[in-house]
Image (cartoon, rainbow, N blue to C red):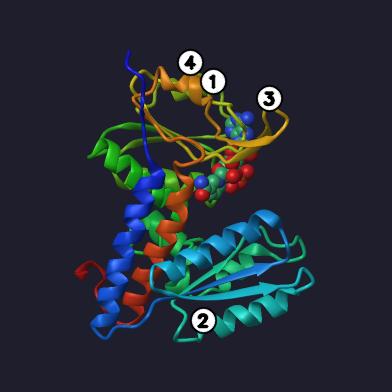
Amino acid sequence: MAEATIIDGKAFAANLRAEIAQKVSALKEGGGPTPGLAVVLVGENPASQIYTRNKAKQTVEAGMQSFKHDLSAETSQEELLALVDKLNHDPAVHGILVQLPLPSRIDPNAVIDAIDPAKDVDGFNVTNVGRLVTGGKGMVPCTPLGCLMLLKDTLGDLKGKRALVLGRSNIVGKPMALLLLREHCTVTLAHSRTQDLAGECRRADILIAATGQPGMVRGDWIKEGATVIDVGINRIEAANGKSKLVGDVAFDEALSVAGAITPVPGGVGPMTIACLLKNTFTAACQQTGIEPESF
Ligand SMILES: NC(=O)c1ccc[n+]([C@@H]2O[C@H](COP(=O)([O-])OP(=O)(O)OC[C@H]3O[C@@H](n4cnc5c(N)ncnc54)[C@H](OP(=O)(O)O)[C@@H]3O)[C@@H](O)[C@H]2O)c1
């Protein structure tokens, strides 16, 4: 069988960002607002510092306003909630993202649920989760949204396909399963207590891996010709002693079985920020009574 097509998430995300930048420019030229995204970081987690810096940079590159709030690790839950409240009432801020994980003293759900659902560009607030479950219109979490865009670009119509989502977190697995259900896939949501995980995976036309376990999905877990989306980002030690990023799928093994697969890095990763910008543009339009689809 031919080698799998490699799904170029980096190129897709670059095109999406360029498209959003054009829409932002048209919005502003038409007298609309400059979309504004507030990114809040508490503490000095090095990975979170890189993520928030990239988010701010790409926000500005898309012609939007970036409001970055770097708070000390000692920030209390009350102080953080007070900032969220201030941002909720700031008309220049259309999207609010509080970078996770938060220090253990702070209840992440209390903070996420304090964000105005209209500004919840991460789509984690219970109101937006509820809308996703009930089929309503709301903000959709960025990583699963990015995965869905790559899947549709690769496969076209997803109707009737058998999809397996491996991992049931609130930020990736669960919303991913709901989005695929919305596309009329037959969805299985697997996790650490699933029996015969390899057998479940082997039945899937679409396999989404989001476990955080490097290389756990082996080549012989994959149905021939399946489309594989690898969400995992895991840093491991390479043979030369340096560290490298790998996904949750044994990529080299999967290449000879899958029909198409996302690489790590360069697959799902870049889609997350591009979808964050997309959600921020949508939020800015909706908050000012403009139809985002009109651009
Ligand atoms: N590309 C991006 O932008 C992006 C964004 C977010 C996350 N990620 C990456 O995606 C991965 C998952 O992230 P997450 O936040 O969803 O992780 P998480 O909250 O740790 O959830 C992991 C899920 O995988 C399941 N799991 C773990 N080990 C398993 C095993 N051996 N067999 C079967 N299921 C197993 C867990 O099952 P239980 O529920 O039963 O414990 C859980 O549902 C991580 O590598 C993360 O870095 C990437």
Q: Is residue 192 visible?
A: no
Question: Mark 2 touching mark 4, by CB under 8 A?
Answer: no
Residue at screen point 40% across, 44% down: 9
View extreme (front): residue: 240
Question: Mark 3 touching mark 2, by CB under 8 A?
Answer: no
How far is disc 4 from disc 1 in space, using C-alphas? 13 Å
**SS assignment at label 2:** helix
Of tags 3 and 1, which is closer to the observer? 3
How far is disc 3 from disc 1 in space, using C-alphas? 31 Å
Q: Which mark is residue 114?
A: none
> Which of the 4 image quadrants contains residue 73?
bottom right
Identify which amino acid the numbered label 3 is placed on.
Ala
Of tags 4 and 1, which is closer to the observer? 4
Of callouts 3 and 2, the N-terminal one: 2
Residue identified by numbered label 1: 196
Q: Is residue 252 visible?
A: yes
From the viewer's perspective, tell me whether residue 165 is left or right of residue 227: right
Of callouts 3 and 4, the N-terminal one: 4
Query: Closest to the observer: 59 or 77?
Result: 59
Residue identified by numbered label 4: 220
Question: Mark 3 touching mark 4, by CB under 8 A?
Answer: no
Of callouts 4 and 1, the N-terminal one: 1
The CB of the residue at mark 3 lies under 8 Å from ligand 1: no
Q: Is residue 206 above or below residue 8?
A: above
Of tags 3 and 2, which is closer to the observer? 3
Identify which amino acid the numbered label 1 is placed on.
Asp
From the viewer's perspective, tell me whether residue 83 is left or right of residue 33: right
Of tags 1 and 2, which is closer to the observer? 2
**SS assignment at label 1:** loop
Residue identified by numbered label 3: 239
Residue identified by numbered label 2: 88
**SS assignment at label 4:** helix
